[in-house]
Amino acid sequence: DIPAELIASEVNTGFTGGNNLAIERAMREGFDYVYLLNPDTEVLPDFLEQAVSVAEGDPKIGAVQSLMLLAQDPTLINSWGNEVHFLGFSFAGGYRERVDGAPAAVKLVIRDIPAASGAAVMFRSAALRIVGLFDDAIFAYHEDVDLSWRLKLAGFRVVLAPKSIIKH
């Protein structure tokens, strides 16, 4: 059993504020990485080790996106990272593509992605100390794209870890 601790807020600050509370706590306690995981997910046993392994391979990696498969049909992709439209909004990359199909077979390698999804992402604490956390002005949605862009502008990489698998 893994002990859990509730970090409560007296007001609803959305996805951004709630995650920032937890991220701040982890960083204060000296953790090198912070992994965000939506509660409606199921993880493969080595998902975390796989994400850390990718991050450890390059100190310029600021965020590691796990490969998300559809919970209802894990032969299909939920997201291999967020794609970003030229107008600035994002959407789940690879949505409903077959894991073993093309172009999925080509795309499922460790690679830079436009943005990481906040549903299953690991951040390097040192990178967050430089660029900051989620923007409190964004209650929910696209806060992950904003943080991904700030990481990239600061010279960090945002990558997919295809062997770090979760179902969402």
Image (cartoon, helix red, strand yellow):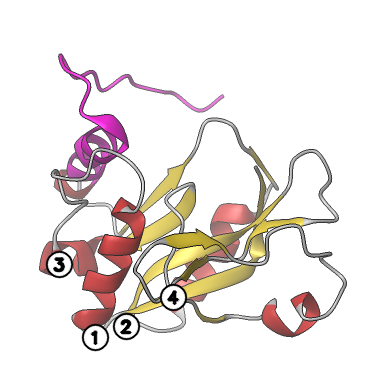
| Discs 3/4, front | 4
Q: Where is mark 2, residue-wise?
A: 60
x and y percent of residue 73 in the render? Answer: 84, 45
x and y percent of residue 85 in the render? Answer: 44, 71
Sequence-wise, the earlier of marks 4 and 2 is 2
Q: Where is mark 4, residue-wise?
A: 114
* CB within 8 Å, label 2 to label 1: yes
Verify whether residue 15 appears in magenta. yes
Mark 2 to mark 3 CA distance (whole Å): 13 Å
Sequence-wise, the earlier of marks 2 and 1 is 2
Sequence-wise, the earlier of marks 4 and 1 is 4
Q: What element carries label 1?
A: loop
Few, some or many C-alpha atoms within 10 Å of disc 4 (few <14, some 14-19, many ≥20)?
some
Q: Where is mark 3, residue-wise?
A: 131
x and y percent of residue 141 in the render? Answer: 36, 46
**First to last magenta residue range:** 1-26
Mark 4 to mark 2 CA distance (whole Å): 15 Å
Q: Is mark 4 on a helix, strand or loop?
A: loop
